[in-house]
Image (tube, rainbow, N blue to C red):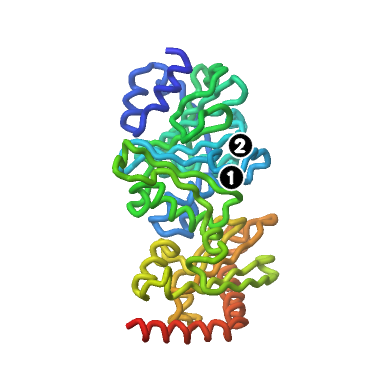
Amino acid sequence: MNNEQLFYELFKCHNEKDLAELLKQHNIFNDENWRIIHLNLSDNGFLLEDKLKPLMPLAKYLHECLTYPKATSSKSNDLQILADGDLNTPSISIYCAWINEPFEKIHSVTNDFLKNYISPIIHSGGLGYLLVAQKEKNIVKFFLFKRGKEKNTLSIWCPNTQMPFFKSDKSLNLNLFNTAFATGSISKFYSYKLPSSSRSVISRDLKRSLEELYFKPKSPYLIVDRESRFPKDIHLEREVFGLNSILNKPDNRYVHQKFEETHFSPIIGELSFSIYLLKYSVDNTNYNRSLSIIKREIFKHKMKVIVTVDGVMEYYFKNDLLEALGYSEIKNHILINVNLEKRGQDPFNEKILGLDKVLIELKEILRCSLRNKSLEIDNFKEELSKFILTDS
């Protein structure tokens, strides 16, 4: 079996069990052909509840693709996230039409090198397999990783100490949506452990999660499920624009009023605030129906204050903060985005500033921002109370 045939066999496996069986069939995957490398893998677990931990690495991977200096296109077709295989633990592939980092540099990794491209492997099934392919001109290189037994270790497959490759003058058929693999990269995370709220028809459920976590992507991307997984669903491919885009559309379906402010903190730096007051009647429906729509479409993970760095969620607050600030009456009708442009060190790196110090500062600035809009918010409270009373 040559390298091209081997690659296709690896890629056709849609769960880690089938992949493990395939590896057993070939002596080339014996232990001596795997090399241990060290990476400081992290899923930002200290900031996240369990159901979000598998989702955040995917959001950061997409962000790395879209912000890479050599990103060549803004078409959603050029960045795709796709599901194959089992309903509960599908394999997740991420295709990018350009090459973000040459993976052969893995020989000289530092602890943070390629971290955001590799981190989803933390949630790749029980065995932790990842297949990466990169095509440039007529050369296809591919890399197989597996999660190490020790923390922050991986094994990379290097048969005869060489990275495998093959030549192909044609585009590869990898079952992408409306495109072939002509150039770029694709990563396949086998048997990915999506939370139950995001695994059924990923073009609907995972999409809503990623819209919150990747609040403001640099450009849209595509999320694709398969007819083989959900033969009765008719919306298996959807573009993802991020929650910021949804909330800022003209003639907005959800937003009653929006305010924007900027602040400078000597601790955190420059912050921009977007405060959204959400409609109490969506599509002219009654209050309970409108609230149900807002909770499903806007507040899937009950995030009421989303703190983003370069558009990616880094921290969030739920109802408890709004209640503490005295906004219990409108807690289901207010969403606040606090965005920090990343300059130098990330303020959410707890080793640098201390997370508690950052959060105390954020809460105080948030209190001031809401106080500056107290007249408008009080008017909204009054309108909301009247509508609920009339509707009931």
Q: Position of residue 266 (x, y in %)?
A: 70, 70
Residue shown at 41%/25% (left/top)?
10
The image quadrant that residue 311 belongs to is: bottom right
Cα–Cα gap, marks 2 and 1: 8 Å
Residue 243 vertical position relative to residue 158 in the rendered view, above or below: below
- For the C terminus, give its image quadrant: bottom left
Q: Are marks 2 and 1 in contact (CB under 8 Å)?
A: yes
The image quadrant that residue 92 belongs to is: top left
Which label's residue is closer to the chain start, 2 or 1? Answer: 1
- In depth, the one of 91 and 219 nearer the eye is 219
Q: Position of residue 381 (x, y in %)?
A: 48, 84
- In depth, the one of 207 and 305 nearer the eye is 207
Q: Secondary structure at mark 1?
A: helix
Residue shown at 62%/61% (left/top)?
347
- In depth, the one of 121 and 92 nearer the eye is 92
Q: Position of residue 14 (x, y in %)?
A: 36, 32
Q: Which mark is residue 100?
A: 2
Q: Is residue 293 left or right of residue 246?
A: left
- For the N terminus, give its image quadrant: top left
Residue shown at 63%/71% (left/top)?
260
Residue 92 vertical position relative to residue 170 in the rendered view, above or below: below
- Residue type marked 2: Asn
- Furthest-top residue in view? 1
- Residue type marked 1: Glu
The image quadrant that residue 245 belongs to is: bottom right
Residue shown at 51%/25% (left/top)?
142
Q: Secondary structure at mark 2?
A: loop
Q: Which residue is mark 1?
A: 64
Residue 376 vertical position relative to residue 174 in the rendered view, above or below: below
Residue 147 vertical position relative to residue 289 in the rendered view, above or below: above
